[in-house]
Image (spheres, helix red, strand yellow):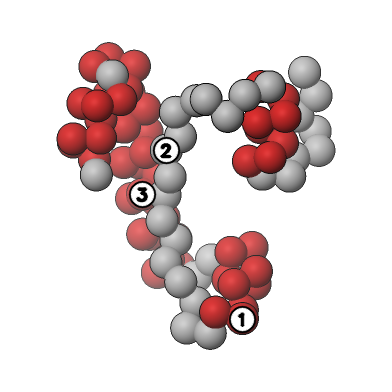
Amino acid sequence: MDLGNHNGMKSIVNVLGTDEFTRIRIGIGMPIDKSMMINYVIGKVSDEELEVLSKGTTLAKEACIEIVKSGVDSAMNKFN
């Protein structure tokens, strides 16, 4: 399985051959000017935003553990 050339979710679906899998999403907010969305998503993360992102990824890790231990419904109840 070659994951060297990723193009986001479409690439993951292609490799797996299905879109039937659990996803954990981490919100990143919105730019003030929506026409700047691409730069906002792939641009440099400020120190302040990095702290928020770090907390989000920690919660995502905890959600993954909860999914494995107790299932998706339990994780959704705890983390949504």
Which of labels 3 and 1 is toward the front?
1
Residue located 65% across and 31% down the image:
13
Residue located 52% across and 25% down the image:
20
Residue 38 visible in the snapshot: yes
* The label number, if any, that marks residue 56 in the structure image: 3
Which of labels 2 and 3 is toward the front?
2
Residue type beneath disc 3: Gly
Give how far apart the Cα atoms at labels 3 and 1 are. Answer: 25 Å
N-terminal of the pair, mark 2 or mark 1, is 2
Residue located 42% across and 66% down the image:
29
Where residue 15 sits, quadrant-wise, is top right
Tell me whether circle 3 and circle 1 mark residues in contact (CB < 8 Å). no
Write down the residue under mark 1.
Answer: 35
Write down the residue under mark 2.
Answer: 24
24 left or right, relative to 65: right
Residue type beneath disc 2: Ile
Residue type beneath disc 1: Ser
Give how far apart the Cα atoms at labels 2 and 1 are. Answer: 26 Å
**Image position, residue 57 (x, y; %):** 40, 44
